[in-house]
Amino acid sequence: MARFLAITGGVGGAKLALGLAQILGPDELVFAVNTGDDFEHLGLHIAPDVDTLTYTLAGVSNTDTGWGRQDETWNFMDALERLGGETWFQLGDRDLALHVTRTQMLTAGQSLTQVTAQICATLGVTHPVFPMSDDPVRTTVHTESGPLAFQHYFVRDRCEPAVRGFEFVGIEQARLNPAITRYLEGPERVDGIIICPSNPFVSVDPLLNLPGAHAALQSAGVPVVAVSPIVGGVAIKGPTAKMMQELAIPNSAAEVARHYGALLSGLVLDEQDRGLDGTLDTPTTVANTVMITLQDRVDLGHTVLRYIASLA
Amino acid sequence: MARFLAITGGVGGAKLALGLAQILGPDELVFAVNTGDDFEHLGLHIAPDVDTLTYTLAGVSNTDTGWGRQDETWNFMDALERLGGETWFQLGDRDLALHVTRTQMLTAGQSLTQVTAQICATLGVTHPVFPMSDDPVRTTVHTESGPLAFQHYFVRDRCEPAVRGFEFVGIEQARLNPAITRYLEGPERVDGIIICPSNPFVSVDPLLNLPGAHAALQSAGVPVVAVSPIVGGVAIKGPTAKMMQELAIPNSAAEVARHYGALLSGLVLDEQDRGLDGTLDTPTTVANTVMITLQDRVDLGHTVLRYIASLA
C-alpha cells in the first residue's frame, strides 16, 4: 500500500487534494496545509487554507465563491456592518461556528493540529489534515504601497498593490509540524510527495521555508512531484501570474520548476504547455491540469500518482 | 427639567425602561444595568441584561422570546451543533455580531461602559446606558445541586434546581460605575431613582451590593421608587416567585418592600395587590403593572414619575 503526502494551500490545491482523496484512503494520504495566511480577525483565529481544504474534503465548500461554505447566510455580517464592524473579510453565519470553535479551543491551550483534527472529525473528514506548523507564521506581502498582512493584501486590497517580495514573520521560531515530519522519515515514511497546484510564493513557500523543512522533504528520498499552478502563462485562480510579472519572473510553468529547483523530481505541465515538455532541467509530464469537474480532479490525481510511480 | 436614574435587569425591567424612554428625553433619563449575569461563553463576553435593554430601546428586541433580536436566524448555532459545540445558550446570527464586537473591543482594552456607549450609538439608542460596573461581578446561584454560574442556573438548567442563596463573585473588588455615581451627587444629581420590576435577588441586588452603592443611592436624598415584580403572588416573568418560595420568603409584593427596606421611598403595587396598599411600612401606590402593550409601558412610566413627584 503506497502512501503519499500532499502539500496544499488554497482553492487550486484543494481541487487536486479532493481528487487524490477519491483515490486514496485515509491511511494512504495525508495533507500538509499552509498556515502562513492565518490571521486574527474580530478576535477570532482564521485559518483560510486549512478551512478551504477541510470544507472541500467534507463536501461543504462553496464552489461558486471558492471560499467559505455552501448554503451560507450573511446575517452576522449584516448586523456587524450596522454595528460599524470590519466587513472586508466575509464570514458566513455557518462558517463563523468553525472560527469561534477553533478560537475557543486554541485559547483553552489546544494546538492548531489538535483543533484541526477535531474539526475534521466532526465534519466527517477522514484523511489526516495537518497545519504546516503549530507555531504562528504570518505572511507579509511587501508591496509598492508598503508591507501588508497577507489577508489585507489578498482580500481587502484584492491583490492590487504590486508585489516586491514576501516575508514569513515568525518562521525562524516555527517548527515543521512533527506530525508531518513523521511521514518523511523512518517506518512511516511516505512513498511520494505531491505539491498541489497552489501559489508557490504564498501557499507553498511558507512550509518550505520552515527551518529544516526543505531538507526534510529532500532527505525523505522519495519522488516529489508538483503540479504547475501556471497554465499557458496564467494562473487558473489567484494572483500567482500577476505576482511573477511584478517580481520580474517570466510567468511560465518553466519558472515554477525553477522555483522549486532541486526539490522536484518532476513537474506536471498542462497540455497548453506541452511545448515546454522535455525542455526543462526538471523532468516533466503533460496532463489536463485545469480541473472543472470532479472527474477532472480524480483524473489528475491518477496522473500524478502514476507519474510518481514512474519516477520511483 | 426633572432627571431620573432607572435601575434595571432583564425583560420586565426593560419593559418599564422602554415606557420611561418614551416619556423622558436622553438628558432626562439614564439607565444603570445589572452585569451580574454577564459571562464568558465560546470565548465571547455576553452581557444579557445590557443587551436586553439595548435591543429593547433600539426597537430590535425579540418580543416573542423575551431575549435576543427580532428577525433572527440560527445558522451559526446549527453549524456549531454539528461541530459538537455548546448549544444550551442560543446565540442568533445577528445577535452574535454584537457579542463579537463587544469582545473585540474589551480585548482591545476598552471598558464595558465605553463598549456599551458605542454599541448604543450604532443602534440608535440615545438614552445613556451604563453597566452597573466595569469590573467583573459574576452571580453564583447556590442551589440544592451545588453552586451554579448564573446562566447555567437560568438558561441551561431552566431555574429548576432549588435556590439556597446567592453570591456575587468579585463584588468586593468591584466599583459602582463612576458614570452612575455622577448622577447620585453634586450638580448632576437626578431627581428620582426608579427600581424597575426586575428580580430583586439577581437583577437588582448585584448593583445594590457593590461597595458603597446602597449608601450612595440613599445619600442622594431623592425619592427611590420600585415597581414590584411580584403581582398577585407570582412573577410576571422569570423565577422571582419560585426563588422566594425556595428561600422560605412569602412570595408577596410585601416582601419586595421588605427586601429593599429603608432604601425605598415608595413601592408601586399592581392592582391585584390593592389589598396590601397602606398595610406596609413602605408607602405604596397602586397601578396596572402588567405591561402587555407599549401603552401599558408608557402608562406605568407616567404613574411612576407622578408618584416620585408626590414623594419629593
Image (cartoon, coloured by chain):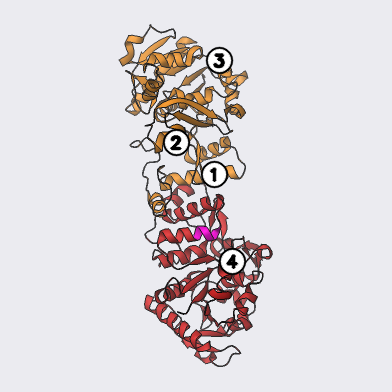
Chain colours: A orange, B red
In terms of secondary structure, where does tag 1 sit?
A: helix
Mark 3 or mark 2, whichever is nearer to me: 2
Report whether residue B228 is seen: no
In terms of secondary structure, where does tag 2 sit?
A: helix
What is the quadrant of residue A62 in the picture? top left
In space, the residues marked 3 and 1 are separated at their CA atoms by 34 Å
Residue B182 at x, y percent in the picture = 57, 70
What residue is disc 2 on?
Answer: A151
Mark 3 or mark 4, whichever is nearer to me: 4
In space, the residues marked 3 and 4 are separated at their CA atoms by 64 Å
Mark 2 or mark 1, whichever is nearer to me: 2
Q: Are marks 1 and 4 on the same chain?
A: no
**Please, what is the three-letter code of the amino acid marked with disc 2?**
Gln
**Please, what is the three-letter code of the amino acid marked with disc 1?**
Thr
What residue is disc 4 on?
Answer: B178
* Chain for numbered disc 2: A
Would you say residue A254 sits in the magenta stretch?
A: no
Q: Are marks 2 and 1 on the same chain?
A: yes
What residue is disc 1 on?
Answer: A103
In space, the residues marked 2 and 4 are separated at their CA atoms by 41 Å
Residue B68 in the image: above or below residue A89: below
| Mark with earlier residue (3, 1) | 1
In terms of secondary structure, where does tag 3 sit?
A: helix
Q: Decide which of B165, B125 is in the foreground and name it.
A: B125
| Mark with earlier residue (3, 2) | 2
The magenta region covers B111-116
- Which labelled disc corresponds to residue A218? 3
Report whether residue A159 is seen: yes
In space, the residues marked 3 and 2 are separated at their CA atoms by 30 Å
**Please, what is the three-letter code of the amino acid marked with disc 3?**
Gln
